[in-house]
């Protein structure tokens, strides 16, 4: 209770500690707290004497003040020199421990090393680069023809200000495109296709000049393009050329840098001034960045629409739940006072991006929002999560995380905290579900949570006999005015685009210029919430006037009763010309939530006995009956969504049975059994007392047995120092530990590398007093080979230094980390939930 909550009353009856609690602290000061305050005051007094006594001696002896200044200068120099030496030694030790990672990072930043150096599954393909070098002049000839015949006419038709746009010079130089690494997918994809991911790097000496009205010139004297392009060879066939078609596209937007020339003339033109890397990047994205693809069929039997816009791989449902420990970006008093942040999150998959709500002044925000994204390629496509602090001028970056959606497709469901990159600390909590696309209409169900129940994929192919404008629809037989007739003669047809919509979702196609038979060849996807009532609305519009040239309405209930839930035909347009038609292919698919694959339960090996017989068999059955409830309780206590490194079902069973057996005295029948633990320094039949740091048979304290909440979490890093052949375990910190007293917990961490559990194999940290969020930052090393380390398990226990009772256990939380599930070469840092294995939790059925 704070001081202002006390009534105005006489204080004669209060002792010294009560008075201190009223005027100073928010809680009553007990004798131990008073002693601690007096001790701190005494230490402060001693330090003050040590600092000021030399000054007094100097004045007492009549010495010059220069001696004091000289001594201060010497002490300051010694401290700085010591810090510099410690920094150099620490840097050297860190470099030795992480030599491979440091060298790779420095080389990557300075030399832009190829990806096959960093990733073992990416291959160096120098033979492909030699082929490209030989074929580069012919590629230049192909690109020159493409620019002059296709791109030049498209630019001229895009705007009236670019009617006279022409390329005056096109030369793609002598430096060819290079492939810095290639990765092939064969097992993760369909058996009739091969998928190649190629990292491309192009720093070319291109020389391209363009002219507008003879007075305005522009040119490119070099460009730099980097990105990853995916090549799909499908379908594989049993005759030459063995591949039915080739499809390639960028999974993510590549990076582009252009060295412009003639900038003075460019700035004088409103048409050229809109040209930039961003504009050109949009053009590239509209052609060959997902979901857009470049397709080349090699046989007649392959349908172009299936290659250009195949059905997506699936849908990922992202639950943006919360974040914690975010960086505080809002500061006050010129940065002297750290405030909080106003965080929001952006999520992007491919070309679709969404933004969450903003949580004001909170470093642990809760959103509880759900988004759905169509996944065209998995593995390959990524969920890009970025967090920002909303400000009035410019939003501050507070972290990002990229997740390959191939992991979600493989696991079907993920629910975990992801560490933010690019910042000192922070995590975001996401739950992701993989939804497959099914063509069975019986699976359609109404969603009570407002989620989508189906997905509609539309491939917009082309149109024919479109009217030139709206007046042609209304007056087919009337003669046009003279001015209108002149305008009609200038353009062979309308410049048209298509708007597609379902409810509030809208999509827009590219513009097809000056033709009555436009070709779009674009794909679109929509989420459907009610198949019975919703419909697909398609409007063909003229580009400049935005007038309507035709309408098509398709009720979604129509797809339920057709074969494969697909419509692929030409449709007559309403409110259009007499023979105006639109060709498209639309496919409806039911979204089905997939469950994670069942875990494989490995049958434990049979326990060998030296003297089998009825007595030993009965002892074994009795032992199993005793250990089964304990192991089941241990499994029930385990978190529903464990962090990477938690033991699987079989390991949990082994661990629960093993811990339960430690609380029992070994029987004669089990004395000769081969045990999981190693020999202790005591006798053959005794357990390693260092396992619990207690006498045999001790139980957990009553406060722990009655505790129903979380026991806390511990942050660990596991990596292998290959140069020194040592396994390194870094104990960082704990959070939300069980409070063993009013002042917190005096905790430390104990480590074993199983099966070594004797005193000489024991590792432990220093004790952190009076806190439930201790920070250790201590490193421990084990002399094992990498192959052996991958077969070991790290036994971690957080213990209370002040025992509840001399016959009670010190453990306040434990976890087992299986090293075979971690990438020890790169190093893995994770938070692990603590639990008390082998302890029967209180039943809640009677509450």
Image (cartoon, rainbow, N blue to C red):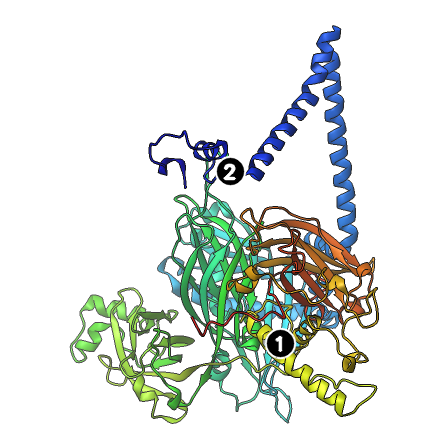
Q: Nearer the viewer, mark 1 or mark 2?
A: 2
Q: Residues within 10 Å of mark 1 (few under 14, many from 20)?
A: many
Q: Is residue 276 above or below residue 329?
A: below
Q: Do the residues labelled 1 and 2 touch (CB within 8 Å)?
A: no
Quarter containing the N terminus: top left
Quarter containing the C terminus: bottom left
Q: In this orientation, which residue lies closer to the viewer: 233 or 162?
A: 233
* Residue 267 visible in the snapshot: yes
The residue indicated by pointer 1 is 631
Of the two numbered discs 1 and 2 on the same chain, state the one appearing first in sequence: 2
Compared across the picture, whether 753 is left or right of 832 comes to right
Residue 62 position by quadrant:
top right
Q: What element carries label 2?
A: loop
Compared across the picture, whether 345 is left or right of 484 comes to right
Q: Is mark 1 on a helix, strand or loop?
A: helix
Q: In this view, does 355 lie above or below 233?
A: above
* Residue 248 visible in the snapshot: no
Identity of the residue drawn at 26% across and 65% down:
545
Q: In this orientation, which residue lies closer to the viewer: 553 or 49?
A: 49
Q: Position of residue 661 (x, y in %)?
A: 70, 74
Q: Where is residue 825 in the image (x, y as percent from the top left)?
A: 73, 63
> Of all residues shown, which one is farthest toward the top?
62
The residue indicated by pointer 2 is 29
Compared across the picture, whether 747 is left or right of 7 comes to right
Compared across the picture, whether 593 is left or right of 628 comes to left
Q: Where is residue 723 in the image (x, y as percent from the top left)?
A: 82, 58
Q: In this view, does 209 lie above or below 177?
A: above
Identity of the residue drawn at 70% across and 17% down:
53
């Amino acid at each position: 209770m704070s001081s202002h909550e006390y009534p105005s009353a006489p204080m004669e009856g209060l002792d010294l500690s009560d008075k201190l609690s009223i005027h100073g602290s928010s809680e009553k000061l007990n004798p131990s707290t008073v002693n601690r305050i007096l001790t701190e005051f005494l230490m402060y007094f001693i330090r003050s004497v040590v600092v000021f006594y030399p000054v007094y001696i100097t004045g007492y002896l009549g010495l010059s003040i220069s001696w004091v200044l000289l001594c201060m200068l010497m002490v300051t120099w010694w401290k700085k020199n010591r810090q510099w030496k410690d920094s150099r030694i620490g840097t050297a030790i860190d470099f030795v421990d992480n030599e491979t990672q440091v060298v790779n990072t420095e080389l990557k930043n300075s030399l832009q090393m190829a990806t096959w150096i960093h990733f073992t599954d990416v291959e160096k393909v120098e033979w492909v680069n030699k082929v490209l070098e030989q074929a580069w002049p012919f590629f230049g000839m192909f690109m020159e023809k493409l620019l002059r015949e296709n791109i030049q006419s498209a630019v001229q038709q895009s705007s009236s200000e670019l009617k006279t746009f022409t390329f005056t010079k096109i030369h793609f130089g002598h430096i060819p495109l290079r492939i810095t690494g290639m990765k092939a997918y064969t097992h993760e994809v369909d058996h009739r296709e091969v998928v190649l991911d190629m990292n491309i790097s192009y720093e070319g000496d291109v020389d391209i000049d363009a002219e507008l009205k003879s007075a305005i010139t522009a040119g490119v004297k070099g460009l730099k393009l980097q990105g990853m392009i995916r090549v799909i060879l499908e379908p594989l066939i049993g005759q030459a050329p063995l591949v039915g078609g080739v499809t390639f596209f960028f999974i993510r937007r590549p990076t582009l840098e252009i060295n412009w020339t003639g900038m003075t003339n460019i700035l004088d033109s409103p048409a050229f001034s809109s040209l930039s890397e961003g504009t050109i990047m949009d053009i590239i994205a509209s052609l060959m960045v997902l979901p857009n693809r470049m397709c080349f069929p090699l046989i007649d039997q392959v349908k172009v629409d299936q290659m250009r816009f195949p059905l997506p791989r699936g849908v990922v449902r992202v639950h943006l739940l919360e974040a914690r420990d975010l960086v505080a970006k809002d500061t006050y008093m010129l940065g002297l006072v750290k405030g909080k942040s106003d965080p929001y999150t952006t999520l992007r998959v491919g070309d679709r991006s969404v933004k969450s709500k903003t949580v004001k002044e909170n470093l642990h925000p809760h959103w509880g929002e759900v988004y759905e994204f169509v996944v065209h390629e998995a593995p390959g496509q990524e969920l890009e999560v970025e967090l920002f602090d909303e400000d009035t001028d410019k939003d501050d970056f507070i972290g990002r995380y990229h997740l390959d959606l191939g992991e979600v497709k493989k696991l079907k469901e993920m629910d975990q905290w992801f560490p933010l990159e690019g910042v000192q600390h922070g995590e975001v909590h996401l739950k992701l579900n993989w939804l497959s696309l099914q063509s069975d209409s019986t699976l359609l169900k109404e969603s009570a949570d407002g989620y989508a129940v189906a997905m509609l994929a539309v491939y917009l192919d082309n149109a024919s006999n479109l009217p030139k404008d709206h007046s042609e629809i209304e007056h087919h037989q009337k003669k046009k005015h003279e001015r209108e007739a002149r305008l009609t003669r200038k353009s062979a047809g309308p410049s048209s685009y298509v708007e597609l919509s379902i409810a509030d979702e809208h999509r827009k196609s590219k513009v097809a210029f000056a033709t009555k038979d436009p070709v779009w060849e674009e794909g679109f996807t929509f989420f459907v919430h009610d198949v019975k009532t919703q419909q697909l609305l398609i409007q063909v519009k003229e580009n400049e006037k935005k007038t309507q040239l035709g309408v098509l309405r398709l009720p979604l209930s129509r797809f339920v009763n057709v074969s494969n839930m697909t419509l692929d035909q030409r449709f007559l347009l309403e409110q259009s010309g007499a023979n105006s038609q639109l060709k498209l292919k639309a496919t409806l698919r039911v979204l089905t939530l997939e469950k994670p694959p069942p875990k494989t339960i490995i049958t434990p090996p049979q326990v060998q006995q030296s003297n089998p017989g009825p007595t030993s068999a009965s002892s074994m059955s009795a032992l199993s009956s005793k250990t089964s409830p304990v192991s089941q309780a241990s499994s029930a206590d385990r978190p529903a969504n464990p962090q990477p490194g938690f033991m699987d079902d079989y390991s949990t069973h082994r661990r629960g049975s093993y811990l339960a057996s430690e609380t029992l005295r070994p029987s004669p029948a089990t004395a000769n059994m081969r045990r999981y633990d190693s020999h202790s320094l005591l006798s053959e039949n005794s357990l390693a007392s260092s396992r619990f740091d207690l006498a045999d048979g001790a139980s957990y304290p009553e406060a722990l047995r009655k505790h129903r909440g979380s026991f806390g979490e511990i942050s660990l890093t596991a990596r292998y120092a290959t140069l020194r052949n040592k396994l390194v375990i870094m104990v960082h910190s704990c959070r939300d530990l069980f409070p063993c007293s009013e002042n917190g917990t005096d905790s430390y961490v104990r480590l074993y590398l199983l099966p070594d559990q004797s005193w000489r194999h024991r590792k432990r940290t220093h004790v952190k007093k009076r806190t439930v969020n201790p920070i250790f930052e201590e490193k421990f090393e084990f002399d094992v080979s990498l192959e052996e380390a991958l077969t070991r398990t790290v036994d971690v226990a957080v213990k209370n230094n002040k025992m509840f009772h001399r016959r009670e256990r010190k453990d306040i939380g434990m976890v087992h980390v299986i090293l075979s599930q971690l990438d020890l070469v790169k190093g893995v840092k994770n938070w692990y939930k603590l639990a008390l294995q082998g302890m029967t939790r209180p039943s809640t059925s009677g509450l």
